[in-house]
Image: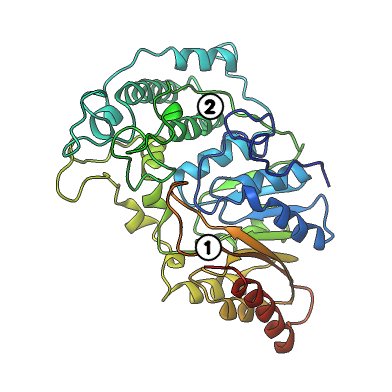
Amino acid sequence: MGEVTLHHLRKTAARDTEEYVFSQLIPYIGNKRKLLDLIHQAIKLTNIEDGTFVDLFSGSTVVSRFAKKLGFRVLSNDWEPYSEQIAMGTVVLNEIPKFENFGGSKEVFEILNNAIPVEDYVTKHLCPTDDQNLNHEKDRLFFMRKNGMKIDAMRELISKWIEEEKITEMEFSYLMASFMYSASYVSNTSGLFKGFHRGWGGSNGTAQYRICSDIILRPPLLFNNEKENISTREDAGILVKKLPEILGDIPDIIYLDPPYNQHPYGSNYHVLNSITLWDKPKFPEKITRGTKSAIRLDWRTERKSAYNSRLKAVQEFKTLIEDISSKFILTSYSTEGNIPLEEMMKILGAKGSLNVVKREYVRYRVSPTRLSSKPRNVEFVVITNTSDKPESKHNIDKIITDIRLVDSNIPD
């Protein structure tokens, strides 16, 4: 396996790190950057090196990048458009695109960062009329107006280049991967776009240093694993049936990190999808009843996940596991997920033998000043060896008991 760097609060900060795995990672619910050591343990227990790794719910792409750095050929899948562009621009690509029509990538980023600000969709719909005189009843405060105008200018320029065929599909994705991080960095949020702070950084001015800074696009770091990596944007349940055809064989490892709770990613990160798709969904320019966050509605009709429902998650997971063909299945989950622990282990145990790595984990908080009722839970990775016979009920019960024991010892 290749050499990897694990998460470190200062050394792997997304904005400044020189480590490929963590560079320009968007802030993300369920981001596994702090759990890569656990995932690494699980991968090592498969005894597979230099194989094929499928990340079915790739999100921020941190696990896809980690697997790529370990030497695997990676297929990174997520059905959100913003995630697809991040994967195309940082996982599929092994080298920086040439941007031949501009003389190179350096020139392209200089042009974008020096674009003359314009007032378009983001400025009109997601920014205040005046950065210094806010109308909290009418203004959406996702970005400062100065940054909204730069986002509009840069995104319009990229669209023009696509229309004029001055950049390729992969060059577009490389630029959009940078855009997703940079827009997130200057957003007046704590990572989620379901709402925004009241004022710049909220009442205590949290993170004004980034929110009030000027948006700048920087070239994403890449890593060349000398393999043909793939990005797809499909429902995981449909994709698994196609994997042998896409990859030429069954994958060695399929990694699963399905949504844990009721909050859909399509609404949580709707602003990133709007910047990616640049389809300018119709909303009133200012806040009206029911439009405060201007959440686009296509996630409900096109990408509504059964995993966000306690009533549907178990059956969706059961069907997915039954349809998977791979040597190993690695499943990340939490003791607070929509799928009950007992049900998950029963479903996975029917597919093969089980092994588990686990540890306590600090729960996601939208703000460092807002504490959860139970600040920690148990995160675990289940390793399912599909070539073995189904796991015994005795061993499944023991695994469940061990995880419950750790969870019960966590103070409220």
- Residue 177 appears left or right of 312: right
Looking at the picture, tell me which residue is in the foreground, 403 or 389: 403
Most foreground residue, 294 or 104: 294
**Residue 298 picture location, percent across and down:** 32, 51
**Residue 208, quarter of the rendered image:** top left
Q: Quadrant of residue 134?
A: top left
Along the horizontal axis of the image, is 231 left or right of 223? Answer: left
Residue behind mark 2: 168
Q: How many residues crowd mark 2 within 10 Å: few (<14), some (14–19), many (20+)?
A: some
Q: Secondary structure at mark 1?
A: helix
Q: Which label's residue is closer to the chain start, 2 or 1? A: 2
Image location of residue 275, percent across then percent down: 38, 35
Up-down relation of residue 300 to residue 18 (above or below): below
Dot 2 amino acid type: Thr
* Nearer to us in this view, 60 or 387: 60
What residue is pinned by disc 1? 238
Give how far across and how far down residue 161 sits, in percent: 44, 21
Q: What amino acid does circle 1 point to?
A: Ile
